[in-house]
Image: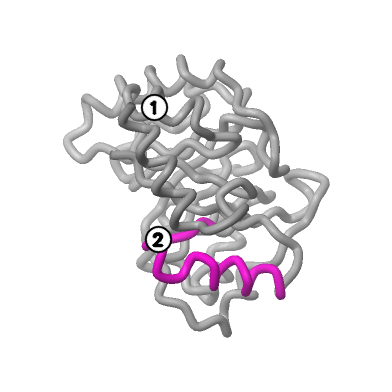
Amino acid sequence: MVEIIPAILTASPDELVGMIEACEGKVKKVQIDIIDGQFAENKTIEPTALENIDTRLLLDFHLMTKEPINWVEKCVRGGADRIIGQIEMMQDQQGFVGKVQEVGAYVGLAIDLDTHLSKLDPTILNNLDAVLVMSVKAGLGGQKFEEKVFDKLKKLDEIRSRDETPFKIIVDGGVGEGSIEKLRQIGVDEVAIGKGIFKGDVGENIEKLARESYK
């Protein structure tokens, strides 16, 4: 079964609180998208905006930033359970993974829509909890799912099949009823869904998508 994770992309602390509250009791975890204005033109809240929010939700931080390693401590202060960094502006993948492990969080690496799998450091794949694959261009919400990502996902599933401790595959961007079933068949473990999941009741929307994934 594919786990559906609400993704929160906002520059507003008040909107952040409202979205967190909308997810309470409906899901186990949410993904907080962090954009620094350098990786992409827009800019979101800082991870530390979560410091004073009381929640039982597990928090994933998806770092679309320059040098994600410099954001790890902020994510810890924000209550991170898992920290996932985009590799495109990351100088040292091993250093980032080691830093996240050092602070006691789960760690993942993320690749943008047009980034080839060969850009992932193969020597650390067996140290990862997850590899996140963008199915839209990273940095903006509300984009259309790009089917060209399917081939990349199939190859990634083949790579992890040789690993004794296989990482999870996450897809992020534009996922909806038309794509979630195929993603499950390919072997995707989690999908992060942004704006659409918050239109109406979060729990009902997730249940509907979960049913779609088994049609």
Q: What amino acid is found at the position of numbered circle 2 in the picture?
A: Val
Q: Position of residue 73 (x, y in %)?
A: 54, 70
Residue 115 inside the magenta-drawn segment:
no
SS of the residue under disc 1:
helix
Q: Which mark is residue 194?
A: none
Classify 79 as above or below 100: below
Camera-nearest residue between 167 and 9: 9
Q: Which residue is located at x 34 percent, y 22 percent?
A: 186
* Quarter that holds the N terminus: top left
Gap between marks 1 and 2 measured at Cα:
20 Å
Residue nearest the viewer, comparing 78 with 25: 25
- Which part of the image, by quadrant, shows the C terminus? top left
The structure residue drawn at horizontal position 76% and vertical position 44%, both measured from the top left corner, is: 40
Amino acid type at circle 1 is Glu
Residue named by callout 1? 181
Confirm whether the magenta stretch covers residue 25.
yes
Would residue 138 be seen by someone viewing this image from the given angle? yes
Residue placed most toward the observer, 201 or 166? 201
Q: What's drawn in magenta, residue-wise?
A: 14-31
- Answer with the quarter of the image where residue 29 lies: bottom left
Q: Is residue 61 above or below residue 212?
A: below
What label sits on residue 27 in the rendered view?
2
Residue 67, percent from left and from top: 64, 51
Residue 60 shown left or right of residue 142 in the figure: left
Image spot of residue 108 (x, y percent): 43, 47
What residue is drawn where x is 53% and y is 34%? Answer: 176
* Quarter residue 10 falls in: bottom right
